[in-house]
Amino acid sequence: MLATNKPRPAIRTLEGWAISVLLEVGAIRECEEHGWMQDRTDPHAREHAFDLAQQDPPPGVSSQAASVAIAEVLDSIGDACPECVSSDGAKGTPRSTPAADFPF
C-alpha cells in the first residue's frame, strides 16, 4: 500500500501570508541584488493589502488578526536595502529584512 503525504501549504505562517499579500499588491519589493524586503511607501498598495486582509484572511485567521499581521510586517521593513550603498556613501536603513529570513 502506498502512503501519500498531504502537500504542505505554500505559506505556513501568518507572517509569510502577510508578506505574500504585500508583495502581490506592490506595497513591498525585494532588492534585486541582495534580497532584502523594502517598503515602497505606496499608500494605495498598503490600503489594498489591508482590504485583502479584511475581505479574504487566511483560513482559520480572523480578519483583525490578518490586518495586524500586515501592519507588523510593514513595521518591520525599511524603505532601503541596508547593503546597497547610496550616492553619498551611506547605507540604507537597517530595518529591512532579507527575504530568506521569512518562513514561507
Image: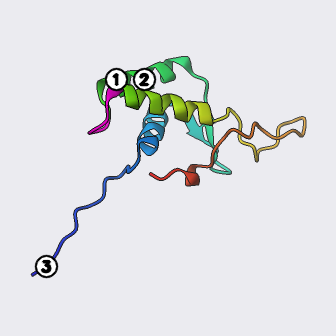
Is 71 one of the magenta-colored residues?
Answer: no
Whether pointer 1 and pointer 2 mark residues with C-beta atoms closer than 8 Å, the reply is yes
Q: Residue at x 67, y 51 (%)?
A: 34
- Distance in Å between CA atoms under marks 1 and 2: 6 Å
Is 62 one of the magenta-colored residues?
Answer: yes
The kind of residue on which mark 1 rests is Gln
Q: Residues within 10 Å of mark 2 (few under 14, many from 20)?
A: many
Q: Secondary structure at mark 1?
A: helix
Q: Secondary structure at mark 3?
A: loop
- The answer to which image quadrant residue 65 occupies is top left
Q: Position of residue 30 (x, y in %)?
A: 59, 43
Mark number, residue 50: 2
**What residue sits right under mark 3 in the picture?**
2
Q: Secondary structure at mark 2?
A: helix
Left or right relative to 4: residue 36: right
Q: Position of residue 57 (x, y in %)?
A: 32, 32
Q: Residues within 10 Å of mark 3 (few under 14, many from 20)?
A: few
Q: Which of the pair 9/23 is nearer the observer? A: 9
- Distance in Å between CA atoms under marks 2 and 3: 43 Å
Whether pointer 3 and pointer 1 mark residues with C-beta atoms closer than 8 Å, the reply is no
Q: What secondary structure predominates along the stretch shown in magenta?
A: loop
User: Residue at the right extreme?
Assistant: 88
Above/below status of 82 relative to 57: below
Query: What are the residue bounds of the magenta stretch?
Result: 58-63
Mark number, residue 19: none
Left or right relative to 54: residue 18: right
